[in-house]
Image (tube, helix red, strand yellow):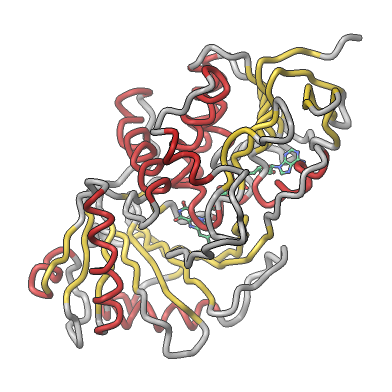
């Protein structure tokens, strides 16, 4: 029997794959999405705490996340489905001179890209973050247009909308090899069969290197584990997602971030000082005591929170801390949306929109020079950047 033919095949129904499929269908391309798991968004997508900000220091991430925010914030009006969008902003409070100078140092580039972000003095910041610890508080930056979304609700809704437009989703079907014609990818194989397409889009998250290897490419994506957790709901009091850039007094954390989601639950995670490479997803005994101390240090009234659940997920890391996006220069018909590091959920819709435009028209939705900063052709080992999250 001849293999089924599609315009595009997306490998991975995750933070990036689902919006990519949705935008490919919007471009009128017949799309197949394959995932090895039994439902959409069950990879690292569901590990994300749902923070969505355009306030980065990298022009490509700023521009892509700005597009993501447009999509997330208009989703309910466009589709009628609530994905937990909460426009509470992001706040980076400064309790030390070093943090003050770091966040103020980012403002010129952020303003150059017309981001709505400013430094607030301590008095004003207290109004934005009620109950913040005033001890040593110097002020902080606040970007009111950023926000939060539920990763599980978003995955489900992007999938439903993509399917409504015509996309086919097949679960429990791992891609085991690529069908190659010389230097071109022309399809994929799974244990169930073979599927052909003009373009294959690799959005397989932490497994992306394996898929690239099937096309003879060495694209370094390494898993790095991070823990998160969520409380029982409490009355809404906290608008922004807070990023505390101070290293933790326990000597184990670089920074710590948390917010209150649309259901009132406090959701949180931190960045460990020493990256924890590998795929171990067992929760550690030290996570909760460290988080509890850090939460109460920033907002003392959180001392009575009831914690509901913790988990450990994986960041798909690249050597320079930035995603790898676009057509691969050495292989035809193969598009990458990989290496999202700790920002794949917020980048997802912006990346999906641009990849779909690239596949459909050969052009990107954002300025091509900016998009190409994340090209697979760049030197991934140059200018190693420190990702904020
Ligand atoms: C604790 C924690 C908190 C985080 N918080 C945030 C946050 O606030 N904001 C944010 O933007 N990001 C956050 N992240 C990061 C975010 O979760 C990831 O960057 C993002 O989910 C990666 O998206 P992805 O689409 O690349 O991968 P995934 O969402 O994992 O999707 C990849 C999919 O590919 C499938 N797959 C893999 N191999 C194959 C194969 N061979 N065949 C078929 N299918 C395959 C997988 O099953 C998976 O469903 C957080 C991560 C963690 C761990």
**Foreground residue among 106 and 193:** 106
Task: From the top left corner, tell me how far across and down residue 190 is, in percent.
Answer: 84, 31
Residue 11 vertical placement versus 95 (above, below) = above
Residue sitting at x 57%, y 22%: 359
- Quarter of the rendering containing residue 230: bottom left
- Above or below, 20 against 233 in this view is above
Q: Position of residue 377 (x, y in %)?
A: 62, 44
Residue 114 position, x and y percent, is: 22, 46
Relative placement, left or right, of 218 versus 17 is right
Examine the rendered structure and indicate whether residue 80 appears above or below residue 48: above
Q: Is residue 28 above or below residue 8?
A: above
Q: Position of residue 123 (x, y in %)?
A: 8, 73
> Which of these two is toward me, 68 or 213?
213
At x 26%, y 59%, the residue is 240
Quarter of the image with the N terminus in it: top right
Residue at the spot 33% in from the left edge and 77% down from the top edge: 304
Q: Residue furthest right?
A: 1
């Amino acid at each position: 029997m001849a293999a089924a033919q599609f315009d595009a095949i997306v490998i991975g129904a995750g933070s990036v794959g689902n919006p990519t499929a949705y935008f490919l269908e919007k471009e009128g391309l017949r799309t197949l999405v394959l995932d090895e798991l039994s439902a959409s968004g069950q990879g690292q997508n569901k590990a994300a705490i749902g923070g969505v900000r355009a306030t980065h220091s990298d022009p490509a991430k700023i521009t892509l996340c700005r597009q993501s925010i447009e999509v997330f914030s208009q989703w309910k009006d466009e589709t009628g489905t609530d994905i937990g969008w909460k426009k509470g902003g992001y706040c980076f409070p400064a309790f030390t001179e070093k943090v003050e100078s770091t966040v103020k140092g980012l403002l010129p580039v952020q303003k150059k890209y017309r981001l709505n972000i400013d430094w607030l003095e301590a008095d004003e910041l207290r109004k934005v973050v009620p109950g913040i610890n005033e001890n040593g508080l110097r002020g902080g930056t606040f970007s009111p247009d950023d926000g939060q979304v539920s990763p599980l609700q978003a995955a489900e809704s992007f999938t439903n909308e993509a399917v409504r437009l015509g996309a086919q989703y097949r679960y429990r079907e791992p891609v085991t090899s690529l069908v190659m014609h010389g230097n071109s990818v022309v399809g994929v194989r799974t244990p169930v069969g073979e599927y052909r397409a003009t373009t294959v889009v690799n959005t397989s998250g932490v497994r992306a290197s394996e898929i690239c290897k099937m096309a003879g490419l060495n694209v370094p994506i390494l898993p790095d584990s991070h823990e998160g957790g969520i409380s029982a709901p409490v009355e809404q009091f906290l608008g922004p997602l807070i990023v505390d850039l101070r290293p933790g007094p326990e000597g184990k954390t670089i920074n710590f971030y948390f917010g209150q989601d649309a259901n009132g639950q406090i959701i949180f995670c931190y960045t460990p000082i020493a990256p924890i490479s590998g795929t171990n997803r067992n929760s550690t005994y030290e996570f909760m005591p460290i988080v509890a101390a850090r939460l109460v240090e920033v907002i003392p009234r959180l001392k009575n929170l009831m914690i509901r659940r913790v988990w450990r997920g994986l960041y798909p890391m690249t050597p320079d801390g930035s995603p790898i996006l676009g057509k691969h220069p050495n292989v035809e018909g193969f598009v990458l949306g990989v290496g999202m590091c700790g920002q794949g959920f917020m980048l997802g819709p912006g990346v999906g929109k641009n990849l779909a435009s690239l596949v459909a028209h050969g052009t990107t939705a954002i300025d091509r020079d900016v998009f190409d900063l994340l090209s697979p052709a760049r030197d991934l080992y140059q200018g190693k950047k420190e990702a904020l999250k």
